[in-house]
Amino acid sequence: MSAAAGAAVSAEQPQEESVLTVFERGAPGRRAFQCPALDVPAVDPAEALGELRRAAPPRLPELSEPEIVRHYVRLSKRNFDLDSGFYPLGSCTMKHNPRLHERVAALPGHARLHPLQDPARSQGALELMWNLQGALGEIAGLPHVCLQPSAGSHGELAGVLLTRAYHEDRGEIRHKVLAPDTSHGTNPATVTMAGLQVVKLATNPDGGIDLDDLRAKADADVACLMLTNPNTLGVFDPNIEEIARIVHGVGATLYYDGANLNAVMGISRPGDMGFDIVHFNLHKSFTQPHGGGGPGSGPIAVSERIAPYLPVPVIVRREEGDGEGSANGATPAPRFDLDYDRARSIGRLRGFQGNYGCFVRAYAYICSLGAEGLRDASETAVLNANYLLARLREHDVGEGRTAGDLLPLAYGELCMHEFVLSGGPMKRELQIKTLDLAKRLLDFGYHPPTVYFPLLVEEALMVEPTETETKETLDGFAEAIAAILREAAADPEIARGAPYTTPVRRLDEVAAAKQPVIRQALD
Amino acid sequence: LSTYTSTTDADRAAMLAAIGVSSVGELFDRQIPEPVRLRRALKLPSGLPEQEVYAHLRELATRNVSSEEELCFLGAGMYDHYVPALIDMLMERSEFLTPYTPYQPEISQGGLQVMFEYQTAISELTALPVANASVYDGPSAVASAAYLAKLHNGRGRIVASAGLHPHTLQTLRTYAHGYGAEVIEVPLLDGRTDLAAWAEAVDAQTSAAIFAQPNFYGAVEDARALSAAAKGRADPVVIAQVDPIVLGILAAPGECGVDVAVGEGQPLGNRLDYGGPSFGFFAAREEYLRRMPGRIAGETRDVDGRRGFVLTLQTREQHIRREKATSNICTSQALNALGGVVYLAWLGRRGIVELGELLLARTHYARETLVGLEGVEQLHRQPAIREFALRLSGPDGGAPLDVAAVKRRCAERGVNPGADLHALTGREADRGGLLVALTERRDRADIDRLAEVLGDAVAAERGSEGAARSPSGRPEQAVPA
């Protein structure tokens, strides 16, 4: 390691005790759980279950509560998180997670509500879901919303199955789904799971869909086009109306991957662009904390023609005084109810009503911001992204070059809420790759942008600052990138060996995949 | 106006100058075609200050009757177990709550190690060697397991026990229609999967054979016999949806010849949340590892030789393999799985057995007590561990009672006696059916109270029988087979 790495490089760290797993801690006989006293006649499991009694109970750890707390709190400190620092991970919308949302989601009336509670006794939950559906529908510009899918890719599956159901109901069997080569990996993976085939669309020099390629591939066998707009290059497709015309012209549907909705809330609506089906990521645009890989929530909004096929149950609202009453006439039907009687529905995608805890948080967010605030959030997200892009372009990194020369914007001049840089010139001129830049950013206390996606950009670096970051943070990040580029011009080995200050350094991922150790061996 | 932003007017002016545009509007004007611009405000209420949002959300909460406010014997897939306080504290820690998926392992060792520990715990619980880091929930886990089977053997028939949760059957059908498989439902015989019909249903085209343990009606299935019967026919992938909370005393899937064990993780330290988020778990025999869906954490070393963890076997996943991926899943339920592994550590090696024994004893006591009531009989005679099914019937000829009406009578006295079986399954045989679940939070006095209230409600409903009418349950099962 070069001495030039300077103050950012810490001394070699000793093997920490915190690397032990929970299975390597504790001692026989220790415990946290105290079982309630047996207050009914004992039942011998051997007698009750016979041969189905478990022979060897699972070898769970044995720890006291203080040990458990200390173990997991120590582990937590080996994580970087959004509350600690800038997290410009492209396509992931790492905006601030308001703590109010945790508080309201934890209220017993929400958190301790059983999903099979009678609708008459869960009117608050159903009204919340109804209101959230209405808000999401207005934001999308589409009239019908289903909250059930558990994440974006789950919403995509719902969307492709809805498209299939729509076509099948019209007696048409269509086999192909078009998706641009810049699409999220979940798009083609979903298409395969839904029993259809992906046809890739080329990207034009401006970063949008190549219209000639689209016209050539759009035919009567196409069920759907899946599109993110703005797309994963940060480009709002200027030909969106023509794209919609072509797709609808062959009888196909248009699906909107809502991963980038944070760019256009209150500014442009997928429904107005011609999309038939939209999924939302409540864990991106609507502040559900990402939890290190979930929970998420992926509601969908659809047009009238798709509505009959929506998953069950559907929330319905009866007008006041419209209660029909139950069979014996004693109890009026509840105002909000769950309707399972939908003959053309694609069915269920999961148990119960979806990730309600995420609905509570997203709804609280929408209530806080309102129409104006949502628009302001998108405006500020786009402002921040363009500002960060401008700062990077102007930063002098020596030898008459700017950071923008080494990391040029892959497409376009401006960007929406995120932008994609190419690390190609940096790689050729400084001999460091995008991966090295990303790893060196860790030493500067930043989470790196998304790297090596989209695939068609050489050494891609996808940056999404979000609206909740300050100008100072953006300035600091731009300065850090410039500092790393200047440092690499002097000595590329520093970035190539990075990181130095993290709990561990670069890990052997090849060995991990070759000889997978995916659980602890126990005695 | 609260958007959780920090941009002042001065900031904005400086930023626009740096960009070289005159207004934020120009950024949009230059990029979005005018016809698709929204030239009006969204039709949404104005934003509210934090305290007013709190008041609104609190008011909505008061219009729900939670399991804190009534004596709750509802189960049928989600259960009112006690969630220890330390789980709330750990799940709310910023370091676990707010990161994204651990794409940068050097700064994500905490989350990755939690995944590794979780995988180990699930592997131990199920007695199967490999587990992933979570899927969405129980029903979708079954549908994903059946997809794994289809990828594994390429066959197009799924044999599914009618003892699966109705939401599981419905989810399975939705997914299977997509990936092109037919679902054949095998009926029950006295509450358990009809073994002869099961064996008969499995043929050379059978991709997967799926049952639940314990099943939806609370009955403990003869898992070994089901696995053996299916394997003896045509070697399908045998999949079990299991309730993890009873695996301290109930034979594990891996001990019963099961290939893939999945289930709903909510009983393990996750709150009810009106149905989610919780997590689905997914464990399998080694040969299925490279077809598993979802994230998998693996142990490795860093360049200095230090122990560390990474996401591994990513060539299965959508972001690498795209249309050839083994699943489309990306974001799953990492934080909820953290709750799961912390719960299992809290319960511990002895606790998981003690809790299982307590549930077994209380379930037996509750079943015996309730079946002694007039008009209440058991729906099946099979062993039960934590949940059991009853039939409520009228006085003349034993016509089924309207369970919804019985439940309303109980609710007036602060008791939720369980789930209305017919409303969930739509099956004629389930009319009058009540599914009663136990957790460690329901003690003997609670069970006695249930017996008193349910007994009175059934008696009253039997008394009011006479005016000719049919039960008013609205079947949930409206999904075409």
Image (cartoon, coloured by chain):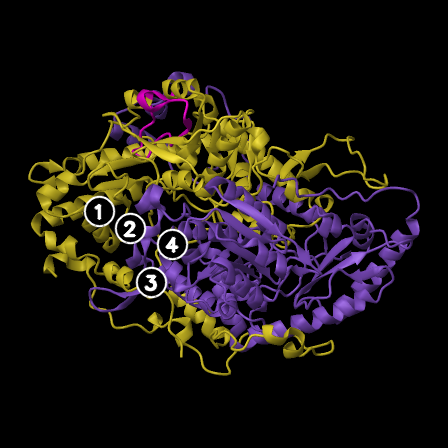
Chain colours: A yellow, B purple
Residue labelled with disc 2: A446
Task: Give the chain letter at badge 3.
Answer: B
Residue where numbered disc 3 is placed: B298
Asked if both marks, 4 and 3, belong to the same chain, the answer given is: yes
Kind of residue at badge 4:
Arg
Label 3 Cα crowd, 10 Å radius (few <14 / some 14-19 / many 20+)? many
Q: In front here: B142 or B413?
A: B142
Mark 1 residue type: Ala
Q: Three-letter amino acid code at disc 2?
A: Tyr
Quickly name the residue at label 1: A480
Label 2 resides on the chain identified as A
Which mark is in front, 3 or 1? 3
> Looking at the image, is A204 positioned above or below residue A61?
above
Q: Judge whether residue A351 can be spotted in this image.
A: no
Question: What secondary structure is the stretch in magenta mostly built from?
Answer: loop
In front here: A391 or B208?
B208
Disc 4: host chain: B
Q: Which residues are magenta?
A: A215-240
